[in-house]
Image (spheres, rainbow, N blue to C red):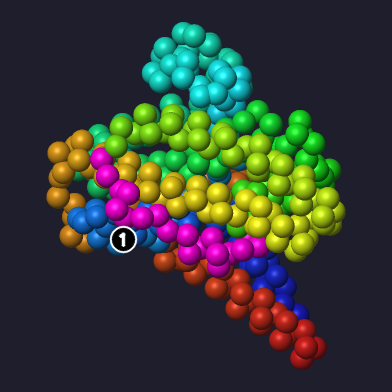
Amino acid sequence: GSMRRWMLMAIALMLVTSPLWAWGSRGHHIINGGAIEALPEPLHSFFERQRGEMVTHAIDPDIWAEHKVMTPPYTHFIDLEYYDEPPFANIPRDYDAAVAKYGADKMAKWGTLPWEIQKRQAALTQAFREERWDDVIREATWLGHYIADSTMPLHTTKDYQGKEAGCVVLQTRGDNRTAHQRIESGLLEHYTRVYGQVRGKPEQVRHVDVTAEIWKDLAATHELVPPSLGADIECSKQDPTLGKGFYSCLEDRIGAPIQGQIAHAEELLASAWLTAWEDAGRPAPPSRAVWVNWPDISAASPRTVHHTAGSPALAAFIPIIAAVLFVALRAGRRRA
């Protein structure tokens, strides 16, 4: 009856509007959360109080890219092969110097991820320096997204779908469509518990030269491209349905290095946060949670960005509410 229709509408609305179902979100949630755990005091306590928001909003930049607002999609990757040959030492670390060498149009095609990270690191440092604590939370959260992107092998290559290597590319949409989606998203979804427990080592968190670290890491991450695509090809031969057998094979082949990348991303992100705070003169963080306004990207009008108060508590409860409604709907069906 009307109750059942209401439940279906509520579930559909949440699935459409909630970023928690966004593609490839799990890795970003894990990395932002793990980086908070790896932080020393006093940053640990300050960020821990904002954990719900910092995990939930880790995927905001993907939503911006989807709706073409805030920042362009090419800030999420870098196709290193177009810029240089390994170890990529000839790429200018300074953005303006890179533009002078390659041209902004080419860079918009090839990706600008490392320079985006530099820009966001500077913005976070400035927010710390000026003690704009709500901006600190926002900038730290979004920096986490881009640092996570930099440690994912297929965000560093022109063959990000695996087409050139000979990977299966499905015509239908969905999590299994390309090697990129299978490795970045599918693997983590099939082994949720394993990847959810991956943690960086707090003793690795230190003051770093973020620019130097990112470029060194990009070269190391890029070395994982051939084994990642090779594993995808071999495992798709073992299980052409790309089902449980495929993912079991993939976990056996590249699970360890992918888990290593996630742990390293947590260490690098925590180090970047710590570095920004130290470079800003170590200002004392507030002793209580701060109120943060998060941009709300409306799917109905993707070219407008509305600012609303973020509600991490509500966001955390959305999947629970959906599950309760689903169970209630099933029960209603049985009674009918």
Please give left or right for residue 276 compared with residue 257 in the image.
left
Residue ranking furthest to the bottom: 335
Q: Where is the C terminus found, in terms of image quarters?
A: bottom right
Residue 201 lies in the magenta stretch: yes
Residue ranking furthest to the top: 100
Crowd class of label 1 (few under 14; some 14 to 19; many from 20; radius 10 Å): some
Q: Residue at x 65, y 57 (%)?
A: 251
Of the residues shown, which amino acid type is indicated by label 1? Glu
Q: Is residue 162 above or below residue 34?
A: above
Please give left or right for residue 240 compared with residue 313 in the image.
right
Residue 165, position as x, y percentages in the image: 75, 34
Between 324 and 118, the residue placed more toward the observer is 118
The boundaries of the magenta stretch are: 189-207
Residue 19, position as x, y percentages in the image: 56, 54
In this orientation, does residue 335 appear? yes
Residue 199 lies in the magenta stretch: yes
Q: Residue at x 25, y 34 (%)?
A: 126
Q: Is residue 110 above or below residue 321?
A: above
- Label 1: state its secondary structure: helix
Please give left or right for residue 65 compared with residue 139 in the image.
right
In this orientation, does residue 65 appear? no
Residue 323, position as x, y percentages in the image: 61, 75
Residue wearing tag 1: 48
Q: Residue at x 48, y 44 (%)?
A: 148
Please give left or right for residue 42 compared with residue 75 in the image.
left
Between 137 and 13, the residue placed more toward the observer is 137
Q: Where is the N terminus found, in terms of image quarters?
A: bottom right
Residue 108, position as x, y percentages in the image: 57, 21
Q: Is residue 119 above or below residue 304?
A: above
Q: Residue at x 27, y 57 (%)?
A: 44
Q: How many marks?
A: 1
